[in-house]
Amino acid sequence: MTTWLNFLAEHGARITDDNGTPVIAFESNEAAETARTNFVTPLVHLGLIAASGEEAASFLHNQLTNDVTHLPDNQARLAGYCSPKGRLLASLLMWKSGERILLQIPREIQAAVQKRLSMFILRSKAKLNDAGEELVALGLAGPAAASALLPWFPSLPLAIYDKVETEDGVVIRHPNAFGIPRYQWITSPERAVAAWPHLTSILQPSGDDAWKLAEIEAGVPHITAATQEQFVPQMINFELIGGVNFKKGCYPGQEIVARSQYLGKLKRRMMHATVEADKVVPGTEIFSAADPQQPCGMVVNAARIDASRIDCLVEIKLASAEQDVHLGSAGGPVLAFQPLPYELTDPV
């Protein structure tokens, strides 16, 4: 266990679930209550890949759905990594830090994605490394988040996915959730340990379910092991939130992604829903009352709201959403659809 995880365990955190999967949980309020107020959570479910070398940007530009070669120093960007069939193998957040480009990706798929990307480096002057030992990520949210960061960052990024970098690390502005601002601070484990007492004197220490719940509320999907190769980017609204650049050059699956965009009306999208259930996991199929024999979509992400309700992002045939939609089977619990913070528009 790392110094950072040891420190968190000593300060009341549970750092794995019953299956040994990295999580963070504190004895605190329900995630739904926490996510609507001031909180700080270690984002141990997210890993970091560092790309270095003089051709790192051009290599990644040829692999990902978004523009890497023109990535500004003061901005982070969402991007996807697709199979040749245009299906997402990963969703990620990327930004420049010094001479490197950092890719933040769910930890459960990081090793496999890093290995696959490395296979295509060939003669490119680029190298990929796991940066998870040298850097840790903290999610901060709420009206008091800015003041909590003030000792290290006198000025904070204002626009969504803008970033500020100092010797104390990187802060990235994330989309609001529940009407409150969110930030991510990526820094060294040593600085995170030193900052924790100050941060938790202002913000409530929280499990990472609060951050996952906020991401769902913001309509930001994350590809996990259960959903790899299931979705073309548009099926999970990825182009609507800035994850796809249709003007850049080729990348794996680019022709299929472009064809999906320019065919016109999209038949499948991602929607926000809540459901009363004991447990919901990504990859769970959903069924429409109109056609109960075959699934009409799939759970992308899920996070518990309280003891009886779970919040979800689900990929679904839009026509099926006009009928009752059930979780797991045609007789499963009914999904209650909720508004997304952005409009589901068709390509123009």
Image (tube, rainbow, N blue to C red):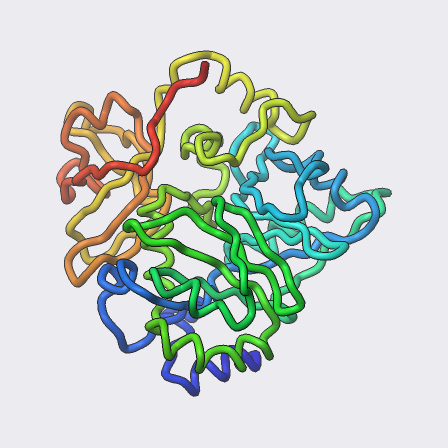
Q: Is residue 267 left or right of residue 334?
A: right
Query: Whole-percent x and y of residue 339?
Result: 24, 36
Q: Which quadrant of the structure image shows residue 111?
A: bottom right
Which residue sits at x=37%, y=43%? 300
Q: Quadrant of the N terminus?
A: bottom right
Is residue 301 rendered to the left or right of residue 183?
left
Residue 245: x and y in percent read 58, 29
Horizontal arrangement in the rendering, residue 290 relative to residue 109 (left or right):
left
Image label count: 0
Out of 203 and 298, give the one closest to the viewer: 203
Task: Identify which residue, 235 or 55, lies in the foreground.
Answer: 55
Residue lying at 28% horizontally and 46% vertically, measured from the top left:
312
Task: From the viewer's perspective, tell me whether residue 307 is left or right of residue 136.
Answer: left
Q: Quick one: which residue is furthest to the bottom in this view?
A: 10
- Quarter in which the C terminus is drawn: top left
- Using the image, determine if residue 341 lies above or below residue 9: above
Up-down relation of residue 249 to residue 315 (above or below): above
Q: Position of residue 51 (x, y in %)?
A: 72, 52
Which residue: 23% across, 41% down?
273
Indicate the position of residue 105 as horizontal and vertical percent values.
54, 52
Seen as rendered, the residue at the extreme front is 154
